[in-house]
Image (tube, grey):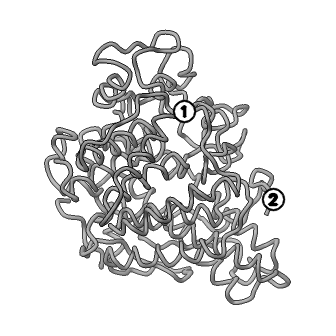
Amino acid sequence: MKQYIKKIKTVLFLALATSISSCSIDDIKPFNKLTPDDAVRDEASAQLVLNGVYNSGRAFDVNFFPLHLAALGIEGTFSTGISGSKGFNTNEVPVDNIYLTNLYNGHYKTINSCNFLIQELEAGKAIGISEERKGEMLSEAKFQRAFAYFNLLRYFGEFYNLNSTYGVVLRTEFSTTLDAKPRNTVAEVYKLIEEDLLFASDKGPIYIDHFYTGSLAAKALLSKVYLYEGKFTESATLADDVISNGPNEGYELELNYADIFAKSFRSSEVIFAPFTGPDNEGKTAMYQVNRMKSSNTFKTLADVQKGTSNDGSLVGSGSGFDPRYAFAYSDNTKKGNGNGKYPFADNQQSQGNTLYHLRLGEIYLIKAEAEARRTGGDLDIALESLNDIRFRAGVDLKTLSDKATLLNDIREEKLLELFFENGESWFDIVRYVNLGNLTASSAKASLVSPNQFVLPIPLQVIAGNKFIIPNKGY
């Protein structure tokens, strides 16, 4: 388990994840050199496939999409173009955006590779592997499959409506052929995600490097999934379990916000962030944050955390702004990419910027929201969880007035804490609107239709899958 991904130069995934044609659909043929019978023979070969699964999460087509989500929401705007950025600033994303095709198929590549590994392990192909290690590998593959489906559902499905038929296509068997299938319901997609994460919570490894996904990562992601589903009691309970037991496994809040990003995936706060290294060792394109600027909405919110509006300065180490905003953008800490969260340049010598998929700061805020929303929830407990994050940030603690105000404070805090990390503030807008806590146009003027909450199913996917129904309004 301790074999670092960076040491595996030639991974099986290079054979698994072949390029796809222009008429590809939500299934891909993953083999061009090896056959399934060749791939998994023992624990070592199974580990190569698993490493390939991890590596697929850093592929170009998926490794800087948080920037697009930031533009969809109120974190920032693209100041210059990058792949697929057309229409994201104004929430008018065109259906012929080729980047969306690659994003869509990139996630199904991961899913198909997960399905292959699950199939081979369950069939007993890894000769000599212990039952414990087999369970751990299965848990990691199921976590990655669940995570890929959670992303696909949030990008291309009506994730906020459990009664919707506009989910995504579920595939739980490995395939080497292109097979058109209809979309599953949102409830069916969530059911599979839950099942995979419950297995991973039970069987996942512990005491691991934070660029792997173990039991605690599965619990953390499941608490987030429960929040999206409206299972607030389950979400709050599981988030509290992650917070309480994290220190036992080496996960705890950093005392200094800036240390999260200086330490990258090695931070004690990071629950899952893929490994990155120099040369070709899994770099992401998150350095392209240099083509974005913070939104006026976000800047104003950061400005009033430490004073009154329009008195913030970014000279030197900054003043008058929320310290997290000042860390990202002040002269002393913004680094070469213009955002201190992503300090590494795009060159062969740099470590490379990673993706912060899950970290404890977010789990505290998930607990706060779920506790506030659950039937019989304790608003004081929710407030305490919110203020734990504000205390670390060095801003004034919130006081309790009413539930509606507290929920809004939590949503704004997630923006202040997680900006440009995983796109969560965009999904918060969509969820809060559909829960009746926010109007879309008041959050962002360009949000004028509920159809804008979901990205279009790419034209090439529709052309290749005769059964798939386009999203509303596209």
At label 1, which amino acid type do we have? Lys
Q: Check the image and report above or below for 459 versus 393.
A: below
- Location of mark 1 (residue): 341
Identified at 80% across, 52% down, the residue is: 7
Which image quadrant for residue 236?
Answer: bottom left
Q: Position of residue 172 (x, y in %)?
A: 51, 81
- How far apart are the two marked residues, 2 and 1, measured between alpha carbons? 27 Å
Identified at 49% across, 63% down, the residue is: 107
Does residue 373 appear left or right of residue 59 in this picture?
left
Nearer-the-camera pick, 197 or 394: 394
- Location of mark 2 (residue): 2
At label 2, which amino acid type do we have? Lys
Task: Bin the neighbour count of mark 1 within 10 Å (Cα to Cα): few under 14, some 14-19, many 20 and up.
Answer: many
Q: Would you say the residues marked 2 and 1 are in contact, meaning their CB atoms lie under 8 Å apart? A: no
Q: Position of residue 473 (x, y in %)?
A: 17, 59
Secondary-structure class at tag 2? loop
Q: Check the image and report above or below for 14 versus 127.
A: above
Does residue 183 appear left or right of residue 90 in this picture?
right
